[in-house]
Image (spheres, rainbow, N blue to C red):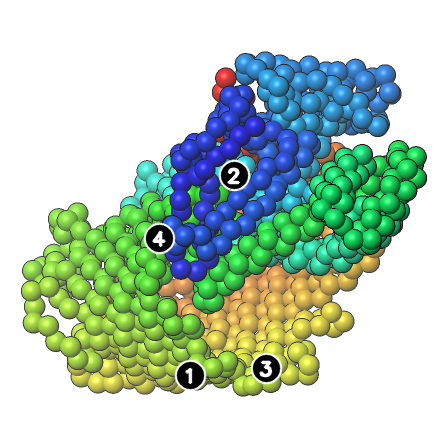
Amino acid sequence: MYSYRFSDVKLRKGAHFADLRYRDGVEEGRSNASFSEVIRQLRTVPAGAYYTEVKLLGSDGSVYYSTGSTEYIDTLLPERSGLKASLEHQLSRGVQAATAKTSRKANSRQIEASQRKVNRSLRPVKGMESRTVHEGDKDYTQIYYKEFLIGKYELSSLGDLKEKISNGRRQLEHVPGAGVATDLNNFSGVSAQMRELGKGVKNESRYKGYIDVSTNRANAQDPQSVIDQNYSEVQGSLDVELMGVPFNVEGFYTSQDANRKAKASYLRFHYDVQTAKEKLQQRLNAYQSKLKETMGKGAGMESVYGSYANSLRGQKTQLLHRLVAESGIDSGTLSRHNGDLEKAYAELEQKGKDSLGNGADSSTKLRYQRLQERKEKTLARKADFEKRYRSLEDNVRKAEHYERLLENYRNKTMIDSAIMAERSKYLGKGDPSYKDLSKSAVGILPEGNTKKFLTGLTHFDAGIINKYESAYTMSGQNLKGFSVGYDAGAVRTGLTLGSTEYVSRDGNVDHYSTMLLRVDNHTAQNHKFSLLYNLTMPAKTMMSDNQFIGKNGATYPSFRSPTQIPSFVYDGKLGKYLTLHTEAATSIKYRQQQVFDMEHSAINGQADFQVPKTSILLKAGWEHLGRSFENNTLPYIRSGTERYTLGTSFDLFKGFLSTKLDYNFLVQQNLSSNAYSRKWGIDLKTHSRRYPSVGISYKPFSTFRSASDTLSVPQRPVQGEVWTVRSSYQIKRHKIVHRFTALWNRNKSTADTLQYVSATLQLGYVLSLPKFTMNASLGRIDQPANYASGDGVMSSYTAMLGVQQPIGKQWNVNLGPSIAWTDWGVQRLATTAGVSWAMQAKPLTVRLQMRYSRYRMNATEASQELYVGQLGINYRFNGVYRKKSMIESQ
């Protein structure tokens, strides 16, 4: 049918993988015209046996090594066949899955319908046709291109085919190695099959997402609220694969932004590198698992089929000895004439006559005489003799067949093992990038996937983003711009550019232009070194604001100068138990004298030590922020502080009680004095299924500790403490769940000369049934009667009951009355009721939520009523976009 010689491939050091491409790699060749058309148009090969010879050549053209292998293409279309994928796509379009068994007559009609659909799908391709054949109890459609059989596909009813195809796709999606065949016949190697399966995935782009639209209407404002109660919102998300790379687009819009300085609406583009890594890691794990399974299966087949081949050769040897003894013909002569007795005897007789003519001795004459006698007896049983000889040849062919199959299995498994050894070089890192994973998948992924520029991307975000790069550069601020990272091999680089926005103390929105460059090096295992350069400057819109001049006592020329912050970050692990983190940064004002000292620097260090063979974790940290260190985009300015921290956590009573202890010592420095603060924190929790879980925590907090701080920084000095006690217990019996909760919280804070104290006590109960949920709570809140001075105590009590009940498969209703009262009477009486309806045939949900409130702010005010309603629509979608195949594009 064909004979091709491909262009030479230059080999590099280490494991090397190359595809022999028919369309651009053939140096010389000949083939049947129709056979070439199958390869070029259908990108497959007809069923049959294909032999490939590989030669390893030296620079002088001499042959160092030569080997060959035969691959058998089965008549059944393989899972990895592109033709099969196209065929299944056509068969499943517009068909409902099977719901019940059908009669034999009805099933026969449905099979005929399936065959007609196959014929229609193949009709646009000139030269292609299909025929229905019945083998055993199954029906197949055989697909031909002119005179060549491409393969066959099992037929059934369209509904059954739809269900079978859907199940197969789901299996391949969740178990990438599910379509890999490991049988002895037609085995092409795990890596080769994974590449072919990957081509099918590559030709499909999955997408999913949702759109949610809602509108909220009310007759008045909630008390103490400045948020507009009449507004509309639109929210949506789209997850899609572009060029095989998963991206997420997310957006939110609210009409409340019309009256806001700080907008809540956003649009965000995100390259989901984590999902990409998970999918690729899933393929690598599937390959590793399938290879282990194949190697184990191969060892078993070596034992079974190897023994069988040896047994066949043993039978052949025994039978050959008997045939030689019976006929007197040596094995070489029999083999030369393929067991033809007359030709074999003729050759021996001619040799005997030649010997006699040359004066042979008596022994030669005797052998010639005996040969004549055996000839008469053997020729009398010629048919039986030649039948036994054909049986001998059959044994030889069978033995050689299984030996070739076993050798092919060994060779392909050896190649797969080489790929496993190669991938281990890239997976030795603690946090491999997508590029590292792609390199480890060479030989498993389709050709070209590992060479894409996109595989080097470590992240890409655009729109409204919040990135944490380090404590002293970008530490989670909202940024309007973009951030991109790339893996260049020895280092990983990153660039973030945009505008940082936050609401200042006067209620205005401050804008800073921000740029950050980052270079990470983690070639040393368990050690990561990072260099960052952060540049910030006030945006022009902020500088043009008349309210800015004189703000915080800053001078205009000094403030508008860009601030440069170079930073060094180290994260590492020494041994098994010690983890280290440190960062050192300094701020440099543009066009000002550069001073590198502790006053202009920020430094922190953190060490965590896990005590061997215990649950004890010890922590120690130190942080210094110089008085002249400046980064106006940080959400919290801590210039002029030095902090020491100690902490530990451990479990007691076999994990029943977990304990955390923290100690903080903080020094605040300014021009005239220093202030000191020492704070302890504690967190205790119990873990048990038999007894209620209880948690107790005491957490102090503070900003700055002296009144003069207000003169140097815009934040107000605040310090305080929070006590929290919580408990929960769950009882589960026969799908009925009872959950009890209790919470007590006390918050005390001091700002300048004002003190605020509040306390909350809440008891809750949740009942969960398979189709019913109820929750109830009782609470008490103690807070200052006078917010301005913090004097007096006003106690309020609350009670709430909520129920949720699905009705059928489409409806869901909820109801939640609540009441709040105090010493002088009822403060608030409210009821919330809602209903949602989900369409049965479409992923569309409509919801309606209503709330009625009647409240009084104090004993002297009259009651007010508030009506609020919300109507929302949610639509979810998902699907697969497939590149058109040759069949579909005709």
Q: CA distance from mark 4 to mark 1?
A: 66 Å
**Tag 1's secondary structure?**
strand
Q: Nearer the viewer, residue 552 or 630?
A: 630
Q: Position of residue 495 (x, y in %)?
A: 27, 55
Q: CA distance from mark 2 to mark 3?
A: 48 Å
Q: Nearer the viewer, residue 383 or 513?
A: 383
Q: CA distance from mark 2 to mark 4?
A: 37 Å
**Residue with the mark numbered 4:** 60
Query: Is 300 left, or right, of 16 in this rendering?
Result: right
Say which quadrant the N terminus sits in. Answer: top right
Q: Compare marks 1 and 2 and give the one earlier in the sequence.
A: 2
Instruction: Identify the mark at residue 612; answer none if there is no mark.
Output: none
**Residue with the mark numbered 3:** 615
- In terms of image quadrants, where is residue 90? top right
- Give the amino acid at mark 4: Asp
Please say if 221 is above or below 738: above
Q: Residue at image x 34%, y 76%?
A: 582
Q: CA distance from mark 4 to mark 3?
A: 65 Å
